[in-house]
Amino acid sequence: MHHPRRRLRFRVSAPRRSLAGLLVGLAAVTLSSCGNLSVASVDVFPVPGSRVAPPRTQIAFRGVPVDRLGRITVIGTRTGRHRGRVVADSDGRGGSFLPNRPFAPGETVTVRVAGALVARRSHVARFRVADPAPAFAPMPVRPASRVPGDVDSFRSRPDLRPPSVEIVHPAARSAGDVFIANQNGPLQNGTMILDADGNLIWFHPVPDNEQASDFRVQRYHGRPVLTWWQGALGPGVGMGEDEIYDSSYQRVAVVRAAGGLAADLHEFQLTPNGTALITAFYPVRWDASAAHGDRQAIVLDSVVQEIDVATGLLLFQWDSLDHVPLTDSEQAPPSHAGQPYDYFHVNSVEDDDDGSLIISARNTWAAYKVSHRTGRVIWRLGGKRSSFRMGPGAQFAFQHDVRVDGRDDGLLTIFDDGAGPPTVHKRSRGLVLKLNTHTRTATVAREFTHSPDLLANFEGNFQSLPDGDIFLGWGQQPYFTEFAADGATVFDGRFTGGNSSYRAYRFPWTGTPRTRPAVAALKRGSNAIVFASWNGATEVAGWRALSGASADRLTAAQVVPKDGFETELSLPYARYVAVEALDASGRVLGRSAVVAVG
């Protein structure tokens, strides 16, 4: 579902480099060659000089097969020598040393590799283990206040109680189905697929006191899959795992964060290489005095990880505290001791086509182009130290979902919330910026706003559709809108009650459930009223009712077109009924169980 992307290249020269920057630069290393062996690069994570490695970190090596690394020695200044095992990555281009026991907070770990040079053309790399703060306690999910008609109910599927949706502006043209994940109940949270008319296609409720987010279609091993994050919430962050389901709605893989961290709700992006880019939040004890905070503050390290889906191994890790100082934040430290300082707040990660990453940070009001090998920040867009001069109207605030738009060279798309609080802009907008890497300027190419105006304090996304349209999810606000390229609204929908979806997308999708169609029936006068549905089936065009005096002798009674998620059929009373789902040519796709008419 992605367009071919253009590279956003820009090198920023600086007269001086910080000590942290010098240490991070050591992550790109060279494997020595002898004889006819060619030179290869080896990257190690945690990056040499890192200060925020978790106690349960794994040590990842990328660039050569693990059998070329030679003997690996790992020694902590407090815990001594660590034994462990080496496991290869699924692509054969690296692997990880998995220690048998955790490291100690505050210690320095030295890694020696006999067969490769890992820092300054030596065999040695060092990193520091952070002092973790207590993990977040899950927060209870607060359901939205009830309003009339805010929940849909179905006689054939009484277990499903999704929030209702209304279409404010019907689709002028259909470009696929709508993918959202409600966050505020009021009865169930879960992932939802809607058709172009706003009718429910599939609802997958998550357990009580959990939420789902970032629900969309991606590709895994060349096939379309459904993906989303699922878990519990902390203070503005998530603690869970990432799900991958196939077109029959069966789980095919689950992705978890490495190093003892928990996957966060803000990003789950599959790459063509069978890997996943995810985010995590890591609370650590940190000196925040430079930002007028406590010397022993609890600071949230925003973490980006690339995970090998097949093995669960870490391939790459980027920690905001290693690369972005607290003083870059637009957020003041909390006034009460013990409250976490979320100075950065990563909320999107984009894999650019030159091998770098684009990372968005809500609380610095900036996006960062980052080396995928070393973690070095190549440039900053927005915020206090922008590498670009921001043109009129180009400055964004509390932004989400920064992406490279491959349809034109140098374009970046952003959902600009504009409010936090404080309110910086009068309205939220979908923003397209043109980056000129020669003049180092960023100018507004286009922007998209809702009518009436919407202002979101958090969340939201910007999706460029293949036909040139733009699809926006308004985050905290209950709307999702499609615009033509000229800014005209061609579709607008919303939750009926006080609900929201972290992101909203539109994708083509074909789903064929392994389950059977559902049916329920009741007696109404001399008729049997039959209710038919099939959660997730996209190819159903009609329903055929079957009825009879005995459960094993049913005959066709009636055929009607499909009408939304649940179709109602009326037929002369019979003791038993069943239904068959039909496609557009009349072929039977599935048959329900036989039920007695109540």
Image (cartoon, rainbow, N blue to C red):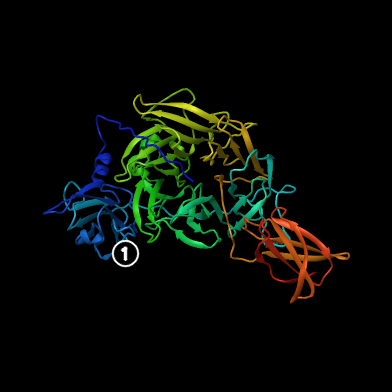
> Residue placed farthest to the top in the image?
392
Q: Nearer the viewer, residue 480 or 305?
A: 480
- Quarter of the C terminus within the rendering: bottom right
> Residue placed farthest to the left in the image?
35
Q: Is residue 313 above or below residue 290?
A: below
Q: Amino acid at mark 1?
A: Arg
User: Does the image show residue 332?
Assistant: no
Can you tell which quarter of the image residue 330 is in?
A: top left
- In percent of width and height, residue 375 lies at 32, 44
Q: Is residue 317 above or below residue 56?
A: above
Query: Relative to residue 443, is residue 476 drawn left or right?
Result: right
Mark 1 Cα shell of 10 Å, populated few (<14), some (14-19), many (≥20) = few
- In percent of width and height, residue 536 lies at 61, 58
- In percent of width and height, residue 567 lies at 74, 57
Residue at the spot 18% in from the left edge and 46% down from the top edge: 120
**Mark 1 residue element:** loop
Residue at the spot 65% in from the left edge and 41% down from the top edge: 493
Q: Nearer the viewer, residue 580 or 132?
A: 580
Q: Is residue 14 above or below residue 304?
A: above
Query: Relative to residue 78, is residue 533 drawn left or right?
Result: right
Residue at the spot 30% in from the left edge and 51% down from the top edge: 46
Count up the numbered dots: 1
- The residue carrying mark 1 is 101
Query: Relative to residue 225, is residue 27 drawn left or right?
Result: left
> Residue placed farthest to the front in the image?
585
- In percent of width and height, residue 76 lies at 24, 58
Q: Is residue 463 above or below residue 123?
A: above
User: Does the image show residue 447?
Assistant: yes
